[in-house]
Image (tube, rainbow, N blue to C red):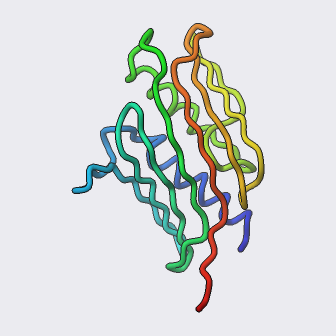
Amino acid sequence: MDIEQLSKFLVKAKINTYASSGEGEGKMLPDGSKEFKFEEREFKYRDRYFGFNPFIGEEIVWQNGKVVWGMNYYGEIVSEIISAKSIYQFLREALKKIPDDKPFRGPDNFKKGDFEYINKVEGIVEKFKGEETVSYKEQLVYRLSYHGGFATTKNT
């Protein structure tokens, strides 16, 4: 597995799905989930989540038809001092700044106006866990926990 190649693909996939389109663009599936997909060369990415507040989801990457990487996440708005629409609009801006060396969510820190995004992550692409938060006027309004890493297929 070429980690640099996978990381570059993850950055591109994430920027071109939820971070760019948000709630309105994902495909609603019969099971009640919303799904975003991105493909490039031998890679395929899918982000599927259930719910709105709270919500739970997973991202999966296939390479040449085999699952190679995944991430699970759970998030929620924790305060009603600002609208969900405003929180998610700011969050998408932060997620577009995804770092190449940590292609999980957004940057370590991003501020704009009264909003601040903080992402704390431990680990590397192969195995990681983290939490992101959004604050508005220094009050926590959103939180998401995530974890994931490589997936291998056992030959039987």
Position of 106 with respect to 32 (left or right) is: right
Q: Residue at x 53, y 31 (%)?
A: 93
Report the front residue among 122 and 113. Answer: 122
Q: Residue at x 49, y 62 (%)?
A: 45
Where is 110 relative to 97, above or below? above
Q: Position of residue 140 (x, y in %)?
A: 57, 16
Report the front residue among 24 and 118. Answer: 118
Q: Quadrant of the C terminus?
A: bottom right
Q: Position of residue 10 (x, y in %)?
A: 59, 56
Q: Position of residue 57 (x, y in %)?
A: 45, 48
Q: Residue at x 64, y 20 (%)?
A: 111
Where is 138 relative to 45, above or below? above
Name the quadrant containing residue 97.
top right
Position of 9 with respect to 50 (left or right) is: right
Q: Quadrant of the N terminus?
A: bottom right
Q: Position of residue 34 (x, y in %)?
A: 33, 49
Name the quadrant containing residue 121.
top right
Where is 150 relative to 17, above or below? below
Report the front residue among 51 and 64. Answer: 51
**Residue situated furthest bottom in the rendering:** 156
Q: How many marks?
A: 0
